[in-house]
Image (tube, rainbow, N blue to C red):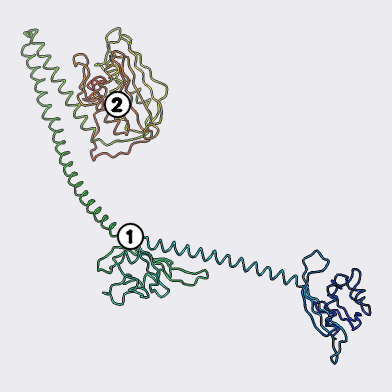
Amino acid sequence: MAVRVLHRLTDGCLILDASLRCRFANAAVQPLLRPGIRPNQVEDRAWHEVLSPDWLDVLLPWVAQALRNEPGQFQTACPGCDNAAHWSLTVLPDTVDGAVRGVCILLRDDSAWERHAAELRAQQADLQQQLQHQSAWLTLQHARWQALSDGLRDAALFFLDSNGAIIDWPASAQRLLGYPASAVLGTAGPDRPDAPHPLPPDAAQALERAALLGQSEATLWLRCADGQRLWAHVVYAALRGAEGEPLGTACLVRDMTEMRRLEELLRDLNHALERKVEERTRQLHSLNQDLEAFSYSVSHDLRAPLRHISAYVQVLREDLRGHIAQDVERDLRTIENAAAHMHRLIEGLLAFARLGRAALQPQPLNMLSLVHSSLHRVQHDPALQRPPGYGVEVDIPHELPNVEGDALLLSQVWDNLLANAFKYTRKQPHARIAVGGRVQPGPQGEEAVFWVEDNGVGFDPARAERLFGVFQRLHRAQDFEGTGIGLALCRRIIERHGGRIWADARPGEGATFHFALPLRAAPATDPDAHETAAGPDTDGAATDTAGPHTG
């Protein structure tokens, strides 16, 4: 049985007798043997016949020592080998009654142990380096945290343990709330409702909500150490470890006192502004009532004397029938013309006033159809008839951009612009009027631009802006009739549609009037009035509106 045990040893075992002849060798002694010799072939053979010469030189002094009954143990590299194997050998004398009967050589390969030890040493070095890095990182993080917590302004960040007691109270917390660390560390909240403490009275409920939801917030008054109150936004954030174990709560307090003061100031300003708006609204309502009264007066009281003047002129003509001198007839005609002109001025002014209160009725419009309708009305207006032999050529394209707008109001724009073009080309034997339109980028997106161009008398471009004011004229009334309101109406209509209008001209070379409309309809933010402006074929007809050169 002992022999079976020796064969199963992982360490090599070689037994020699006193004459150094081999008596036993297990498989693990193969590294000691000569090439070609197996451990089961060494029995009864001299050791120098079976052992490698290199190993003989190494073992000889230790075997001689064992024969003197002196055991020995040593370590050596594999002799004659280039590998890194490392061996541990033990040479023991086999004694019986004090006499040496043989020698036992035990062989152990320490290479694996050495490699393992080297790996352990390397791992230990790596671990130490990692610990150094981790320690440096923790030191840096702690320094950063300390710098952050101490450097906060108008805010404080401190920590509570799992029981709600304060365990960290940095300088920022002491600076914001005034409590020294010695007074609050280890405390879990105010013992009495009137006791000064940095945590609010409902801190326990807030911590419970944070534990359930991960975070809770509140905006409330906090009491500082000096008794003053602080309007603060408090955030409780529950902290948990990698395994989900509770680590406590982080508490962030931010001073919102100044913001609350500004909010109250803004609220007071809004209330004051609302009161001013209400007052201005009442004033505007009163002004609108005055304007309504004025419109009624203009519509009825001012027009009545004009009707009387016209009626009495007619009575005078009947009374003086057949006896009217030429100068008297001229005076009567002057009175009639002045009354008629005054009537047209009143109608134009009323139309301008009504336009500001009229509600827009936007709808998709075929602009080419509006142009043809306006041209038909203008061409059949008796006041715009041309002298015999004076022709006019009107150029209208086959297509114009379509827009959204109020059909009645935009028709009035075309009526006024075309009527002006006919009026101010009256003295041209070969008048030319051109209408055009295109889509182009504008200040507020894409817009449709339209124009009416003529070769009439033109005007000074430096005075173009005056054309769009009420009662503004650039030519004498005896040369070209009109009230000076037509272009003012056009401007108001275009601007109420969200567009713009302008003019280009040169004296004696004609004029071009442009207006631009957004492709999308302007929002209908009109007053409560439901009146519509008078169209050009009403009392404020196209013949009574100002042309492009009269404003």
Image quadrant holding the N terminus, namely bottom right
Locate residue 267: give its quadrant.
bottom left
Image quadrant holding the C terminus, namely top left
Locate residue 322: give its quadrant.
top left
- Closer to viewer: mark 2 or mark 1: 1
Categorize mark 2 by other alpha carbons within 10 Å: few (<14), some (14-19), many (20+): many
Residue 60 % position (x, y): 85, 76
Amino acid residing under circle 2: Val
Q: CA distance from mark 2 to mark 1?
A: 63 Å
Instruction: Please indicate whether residue 144 sits to the left or right of residue 501 in the image.
Output: right
Instruction: Please indicate whether residue 499 sits to the left or right of residue 470 in the image.
Output: right
Q: Is residue 508 above or below residue 114?
A: above
* In the foreground, 207 or 423: 207
Amino acid residing under circle 1: Asp
Residue 279 % position (x, y): 17, 46
Residue 489 % position (x, y): 25, 28
Locate residue 25: give its quadrant.
bottom right
Mark on residue 43? none
Instruction: Please indicate whether residue 287 sits to the left or right of residue 124 in the image.
Output: left
Q: Is residue 74 above or below residue 138?
A: below
How many numbered circles are shown? 2
Q: Is residue 152 above or below residue 326?
A: below
Residue identifier under label 2: 413
Farthest residue, direction bottom? 97
Residue 245 % position (x, y): 49, 72
Residue identifier under label 1: 154
Question: Could you tell which of marks 2 and 1 lies nearer the N-terminus?
Answer: 1
Q: Are marks 2 and 1 in contact (CB under 8 Å)?
A: no
Q: Who's the residue at 53% across and 65% down the image?
A: 134
- Give the structural element (helix, strand or loop) at label 2: helix
* In the foreground, 457 or 261: 261
Q: Who's the residue at 16% across and 23% down the image?
A: 343
